[in-house]
Image (cartoon, rainbow, N blue to C red):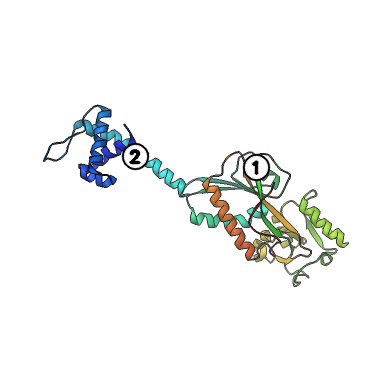
Amino acid sequence: MNLRQLEAFRAVMVTRSITQAAQSMHLSQPAVSKLIADLEYAIGFKLFVRSKGSALTVTPEAEYFYHEVERSFIGVDALKKTADDIRNLSTGNLHIASLPALAFSFLPHVIRAFQKRHPGVSIHLDTHSSSTVRQLVANQQFDIGLATRAHEVAGMSASTFLRSVGACILPPGHRLADRAYIEPADLAGEPFISLMHGDRTRRRVDRIFEDAGVERDLVVETQYAITHCNLVTLGVGCSIVNPATAIGFVSQGLVILPFRPRIEFEYLLYTPSFRALSQTALRFIEIMTEVRDEMVAAGTFGEPPVGQGAPTDDT
C-alpha cells in the first residue's frame, strides 16, 4: 500500500467515478483502475464492485476505510501546507543579535522591508555589546549577528558588512553648526563625549587628536553611540559617531557634520558555523544588504567609504 494508491482511492470516493478520478489526477483511466486493483490486493478486500453498464458501487468496507484514509490525508495536507509556508517564507522564526549602533537606526529599516515581503516570519532582535553578540552567535544561539571586529572566535563565520565614515555631532545651536565640516582644531577645549578606554574606535579617535596636537575636555566616557547622541542633544558636549546612529536625533535638533580626517567604523556580519543558515536567514541577509546599499547611496552612513561594496570574506 502506498500514497499514490490511496490518492487514487480517495479520488474515486470523492467523484464516485473512475473516469472523473483519472481526470482529477491527470492520469489515464486504466492507470487509476490499476492503482485501485493494487490497493485491493494489498489490503485484502474489495473496495468497489464493477458491473458492466452500471454505476460503480462502493462497498461498506470502502466507506469505513475511506473514513480513516481521509483522517490521514488531513495530516498530509497540513504537512504540505507547512512545507509550502516554509518554502515561501510564510512562517518561521529569526533570531538577530546586534550592537546598538545598528540596532537603533539601521535594522528597523531592514525589518520593515523584510516584514512587508514576509509578514508571517517572527523576528527576535536582541541588542548587546559587540563582545556579547559575537559570543551569542558563536554559541549557535542566534542566526545573525552584527558587531565590530575582534580576534577570530571559534564557532562562527565573519564577513565585513559595512564601513561607515564617522561624523561629528553637535548640540542644537552650537557655534560650529554652520561649518561645512569639522576638524580636530575646531574642537580644542570643547566638552567631548568619548567611547570607553580599550575600545578600538576610541583609540583611533584619540590618536587623531594627539597627532593634531589638540586637547579636548573629556567630560563623559560611555559605551554606546546612542547614549552619545542623547548626551549631545542635551548639550552635554560633542562627539564622533557613526552618522546612521545619529540620524534619529536630527528631529531633536542634533547637528551632524562630516569630520576630517576621515575615520571609518567597521561592522561585521557574524553567522554560526556549526549549522546551516535557514532560507529565512539567507533572505534576511539579502534584504539587509539591499537596504545597506540604498542607505550608503543616500549618504546615511556618511561619505561613501573607500572600497565600499559587497561583503567580503574576512578570516
Label 2: which residue?
74
Dot 1: element: strand
Give how far across and how far down residue 20 sits, in percent.
22, 46
Marks 1 and 2 sit apart, C-alpha to C-alpha, by 41 Å
Q: Nearer the viewer, residue 286 or 97?
A: 286
Q: Please state if 79 lies on the left or on the right of 211 as rendered.
A: left
Q: What residue occupies the far left of the structure in this picture?
A: 53
Quadrant housing residue 254: bottom right
In the rendered image of this protein, does residue 178 appear above or below residue 71?
A: below
Q: Quadrant of residue 45?
A: top left
Amino acid type, callout 1: Met
- Identified at 52% across, 45% down, the residue is 93
Does residue 125 appear left or right of residue 14 in this picture? right
263 versus 146 height, above or below? below
Image coordinates for residue 210, horizontal then vertical, percent: 86, 58
Residue 121 vs residue 250, the one in the foreground:
121
Please say whether residue 226 is visible from this viewpoint: yes
Drawn side of residue 219 relative to residue 152, left or right: right
Q: Position of residue 96 (x, y in %)?
A: 60, 47
Q: Residues within 10 Å of mark 1 (few under 14, many from 20)?
A: many
Q: Are marks 1 and 2 in contact (CB under 8 Å)?
A: no
* Residue at the disc numbered 1: 156
Residue shown at 71%/52% (left/top)?
Answer: 224
Amino acid at the residue labelled 2: Ile
